[in-house]
Amino acid sequence: MSTGTPDILSAEFAADPYGAYAVLREEAPLLWHEGMQSYIVSRYEDVERVFKDQVFTTANYDWQLEPVHGKTILQLSGREHSVRRALVAPAFRGSELEQKFLPVIESNARELIDGFRGRGTADLVEEFATRFPIGVIVDMLGLDKADHARFQKWYTSIIAFLGNLSQDPDVTASGLRTKEEFAEYMIPIVRARRENPGDDLLSTLVTAEIDGETMSDEDVKAFCSLLLAAGGETTDKAIGSLFALLLQHPEQLQAVRDDRTLIPQAFAETLRFAPPVHMIMRQPAEDVEIGGGTVPAGSTLTALIGAANRDERRYKNPDAFDIFRDDLNAKNAFSAAADHMAFALGRHFCVGALLAKSEIEVGVNQLLDALPNLRLADGHTPAEKGVFTRGQAALPVVFDA
Ligand code: HEM
């Protein structure tokens, strides 16, 4: 690493990665990071290629996630991946999503908002964002919401394991413990559901069959673990960032309040400007030329989503939050044709993108209805936290009760 290149593992970087991203894009579009033992790319065109070109395999998840989840679709490729993905994808789109899960999304949002709508103050992160998506997934799976604290502890520990860039041994140990605890909790439930299926997503998973392929108890447990982590932490961060950004741009908040059809584009611009997941790794199957250099086969390559989404080569005035920008297509933003990188692209494009969109639409609508004259609490300046995943740690607000 050349001197003067911002170090991803430094406190300065954690405080403000965006300035460092600009330097990386300009001066070190391909960087070897000794501490992370990884190559890094930051330009839009390179990150896009890493997600789309299958020479960049997901074998990195063998060590980055398998020890805490077991094997999941993130690690699969080719036909094996498409069959497995086809087993689960229908639950996350179209009529299944609308008829079965929209009511669950609506009731989860309402229940949480009922807890503070009469009070005039709330912390939108602590009291809403960290609870809402996980409540939705737990209800979808037909698990017990009374166990919310345990689910949240588990997914936080899994995400910390995934983003353990400095290989902190405590983080590793906590992740491995989570795998044991989650298996102990989940496997008996999976078995019982197989015996006695109901109308929930877990029953769909245990009975699903495509081309004679089904999921074992272990597969189902691993997938549930992935759902809690991939769908909990990310949507949680997205809601906090969306409100923080709108509250800091009151004219855009007013526009969304007046015209709710703007919610998807406000969400899309939030995903571009402040993506919940700032980086994703890959492992090239062969030597690859990218970013002006060569990445050897089998090495780890980190694609900086947060940097690609602010690339001046792709977006005009990229450091401005503007839900009306004309170089981000909100219609495609939740499909694999998306022109931001927050859900990745290609084969592993986020299977929960439309679910996340529904959650945001319902959550934002209900919050705006319930909280008139919403503003930041006196003295609070929103601040992002995190390097691998990133979002608001707290968002205290006031409103007319
Ligand atoms: C704003 C919210 C979300 C963001 C930013 C997000 C981000 C991502 C990203 C970046 C990936 C690609 C990982 C890779 O290529 O290595 C991904 C994949 C995935 N996401 Fe999401 N996600 C979100 C919401 C959700 C939700 C709500 C669910 C489900 C409950 C979900 C489930 C998944 C699954 C299962 C995959 C793996 C897909 C595959 O390997 O084919 N995500 N997500």
Image (cartoon, rainbow, N blue to C red):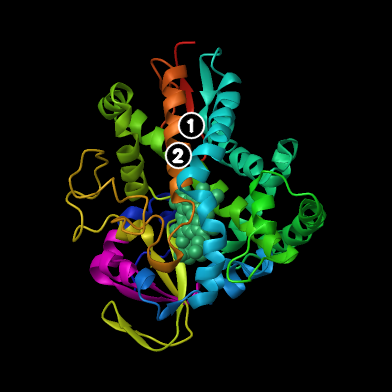
Q: In the displayed structure, would residue 382 be above or below residue 317?
A: above
Residue depicted at x 56% and y 24%? 110
- SS at badge 2: helix
In this view, 293 is above or below 27: below
**Can the viewer see residue 9?**
no
Q: Nearer the viewer, residue 196 or 49?
A: 196
Q: Position of residue 159 (x, y in %)?
A: 59, 56
Q: Which residue is mark 2?
A: 358
Amino acid found under the numbered disc labelled 2: Ser
User: Disc 1 on helix, strand or loop?
Assistant: loop
Say which mark, if any, is on residue 71. Answer: none
Name the side, left or right, on which 354 lies relative to 22.
right
At 74% from the left edge and 35% from the top edge, which residue is drawn? 146
Pinpoint residue 32: horizontal percent, then vertical percent.
40, 78
Disc 2 or disc 1, which is closer to the eye? Answer: 2
Give the number of marks.
2
Q: Position of residue 115 (x, y in %)?
A: 61, 20
Residue position marked by numbered label 1 in the rendering: 395
Specify the amino acid type for callout 1: Leu
**Mark 2 and mark 1: span between their CA atoms?**
22 Å
Furthest residue toward front = 211
Which quadrant of the structure image shows residue 135?
Answer: top right
Residue 22 seen anywhere in this rendered image of the structure: yes
Q: Position of residue 124 (x, y in %)?
A: 51, 30
Quarter of the rendering occupied by the N terminus? bottom left
Q: Nearer the viewer, residue 344 or 92?
A: 92
Magenta stretch in the rendered image:
21-49
Q: Residue at horizontal 46%, vertical 74%?
A: 282
Q: Residue at x 45, y 11 (%)?
A: 400
